[in-house]
Image (tube, rainbow, N blue to C red):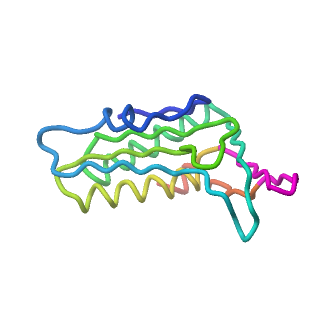
Amino acid sequence: MFVDVTPDPIVPEEVHACVGDPADGAVLLFLGTVRDHNDGRPVERLHYDAYRDMALRELRAIVAEAATRAGTDRIAVVHRTGTLEIGEVSLAVAVSSAHRAETFDAARWIIEEVKRRVPVWKREHYTDGRGEWLPGETPEPAEERA
């Protein structure tokens, strides 16, 4: 298992290399990228800010939960911080396991939990020069997730 929160560009091949085993029949690499619009507004770039220590702790918890759910510990998650331009990778999730269904289910679950629980904030910068912090979800306390 591997997790990171970094201001450095995400290199998909490096994330992919963190997973895989000769017993695996499925390897999935998801890349979330910065798109040029949101809610009908043209976007120029994004800025991600994070409470890194807490984000890493929560990512580790998410990956551990996913490993239990999917029956594989071959999982890697990397979230980018800083200013990202259109097309840059903001999130990479790699999962490998014996079967495709478990691999897809684990990756999707991880992506949704990252968006819901990890303390990363996103500010959109629009082509009209305005910017806006997007509302996030408030994570529920750990004891309520159990």
Residue 21 coordinates in the image, percent (x, y): 18, 38
Image quadrant assignment for residue 82: top right
**Magenta: main secondary structure:** strand
- In which quadrant of the rendered image does the N terminus lie? top left
Q: Is residue 142 magenta?
A: no
Residue 70 coordinates in the image, percent (x, y): 28, 53
Residue 17 coordinates in the image, percent (x, y): 31, 33
* Residue at the spot 50% in from the left edge and 40% down from the top edge: 59
Q: Between residue 135 and residue 132, name the one nearer to us.
A: 132
Residue at far left of view = 23
Q: Is residue 125 magenta?
A: yes
Q: Is residue 61 left or right of residue 133?
A: left
Residue 106 sits above or below residue 88 on the image: below
Residue 106 coordinates in the image, percent (x, y): 35, 55
Q: Is residue 145 left or right of residue 64?
A: right
Residue 131 sits above or below residue 5 on the image: below
Q: Between residue 79 and residue 62, name the one nearer to us.
A: 79
* Residue at the spot 29% in from the left edge and 37% down from the top edge: 19
Mark count: 0
Q: Is residue 132 left or right of residue 18?
A: right
Q: Which residues are magenta?
A: 120-133
* Residue at the spot 53% in from the left edge and 35% down from the top edge: 57
Q: Is residue 84 left or right of residue 15?
A: right
